[in-house]
Amino acid sequence: MLFACIHVPDFPVQAALRAEFKAESKTEAVALLDGPESLLKVVACNAPARRAGIALGMTKLEAEVCPGCVLRKRVAEEEESAQAALLDCGYNFSPRVESTGPGTIIFDLTGSERLWSTAQIGPLLLDRALALGFVVNAGIGANPDTALCAARGLPGITVIAPGNEAACLGCLPIAVLEPAPEILDTLDAWGIRDLKSLAALPPVPLTQRLGQYGLHLQRLAQGEIQRELIPAELPAVFHEIMELEEAVDLLEPLSFLLNRLLEQLTARLQARSLGTDQVHLYLSLEVHSDRDLRAAIPGLVDPIAPLHQRTLKLPVPTQDAKVLLKLWQLDLAAHAPQAPVKKIRMEAIPARLRLTQTGLFLTSAPEAAKLEITLGRLRAVVGETDTEGRSRVGFPVTVDSHRPDSFQVASTTSEHLELESTEPHELMASSRVALRLFRPPLAASVQFKDGRPVAVKFHRRQAEVLHAAGPWRSSGAWWDASENWNRDEWDLNLCLDGTAGLYRVYRDLFTGRWFVEGIYD
């Protein structure tokens, strides 16, 4: 059996720096503060900060004295997002991944030797973690706890061969086992400060003094513990968060930040072989109601909401961060936040990717992503809905009604949009004619003789009726004065300027007016 452990040193700090864009930010001295605003204390710091004199438990005033150290407020949501991203890293290599602790995961590599050798797995782990924004230590061993101790105590990649656990772990301090504080004090008083010394103690006297817990620690130091992993549950939503030191009020720098979050989200989705067809964006705004002069006049304007929410829905799941960024740029250009943005939270609903294979005799359709960007640009120009709340951009869908020309425009994500596939031979065998509608219909006047139309005048021209079929009466929605209709329809073969054509003509029985509705192809 083979297990691997990935451990992120100074995990809270790396989680806070994961969304940084500058390479030098990874090596600068950073300390995180937490607690009440009146008594902020250092709860985490990285190695450069410790070299600068930062220690855990320092107050904010004491930490500000240390030169060249950046102080930040700890954000729990950033650590949750970073832990989820770390789990996604493990799922690149194994379906069984355990979330052992903050910044630490263990996964089962049994069987992976068919794909990679033991020497190849370590660099792959580090490269994948680095792509997600982490600098990690990796341990590989025959049991989970051996790999865990190696990753916590040894830098870089450590591969421990079966049977050599005690020798490899002997130099590590007792703290890598994370014993109870009173046990750690007792062992320190005995002069036991590394795993080699703990492993050499006689087990019976050790059990008499420290109980079964002490014997368990000794077996961990010897690398003899075998246990089952507790697989982590798959998240229902992938989310990324970024809290800004200075609020952003322009679309261009906001797009730059959104691009970073989208890259992180799509990288995590790709690690699970998933896509997304629904992305939610939550922008926390910097609102100062006491400084808004418009809000001082009651009823003049609505107060600015502190949270700006937008949702992006796609017809087909995608993993392309560039497509999602372009759609967000178009959406935010049309629905810009009313105040500077100080915090960004993005959530992606996972969905399985659709794999399709087109036929040899079917016309290729445009890519779904490019089509969605085109529709987004159209919405930005003409707007999303009209005055009656109907969509202006989308696909025509027939309505369950007998009313002529009854349809609505459905978006690409509408549940009612169902495209029926038609085989090529069915298209070739069809003998139906199409009616090309005039929008709006052309006003006309019709001359009758013996109850039959003989001439039609429309568009400043007069046409002779060669053949006539009709009338066909159509009516409905009598219960709604705004929606009811009642009309007589005729199909007329007209000779217009020496050319014959088949036209649809109807009379509105409510107004008595005639219209030319369209021409048959």
Image: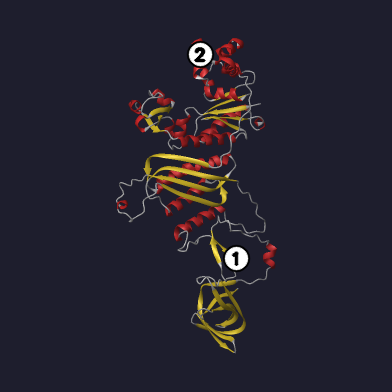
Counting residues from the start of the chain, the first of labels 1 and 2 encountered is 2
Considering depth in this image, is 484 or 494 the residue closer to the camera?
Answer: 484
Q: Position of residue 278 (x, y in %)?
A: 53, 49
Q: Which residue occupies 42% across, 33% down?
A: 74
Question: Mark 2 falls on what kind of element?
Answer: helix
Q: Is 81 situated left or right of 140 in this image?
A: left
Q: Is 144 situated left or right of 64 in this image?
A: right
Please indicate, yes or no, whether residue 370 appears anywhere in the rendered image. Answer: yes
Q: Quadrant of the N terminus?
A: top right
Q: CA distance from mark 1 to mark 2?
A: 80 Å
Q: Residue placed farthest to the front in the image?
A: 479
Q: Which residue is mark 1?
A: 400
472 w.r.t. 212: above or below: below
Report crowding for label 1: few under 14, some 14 to 19, many 20 or more residues within 10 A (C-alpha): few
Q: Quadrant of the C terminus?
A: bottom right
Q: Which residue occupies 63% across, 25% down?
A: 227
408 w.r.t. 313: above or below: below
Q: Which residue is mark 2?
A: 186
Q: Residue placed farthest to the bottom in the image?
A: 450
| Amino acid under disc 1 | Asp
Considering depth in this image, is 55 or 501 the residue closer to the camera?
Answer: 55
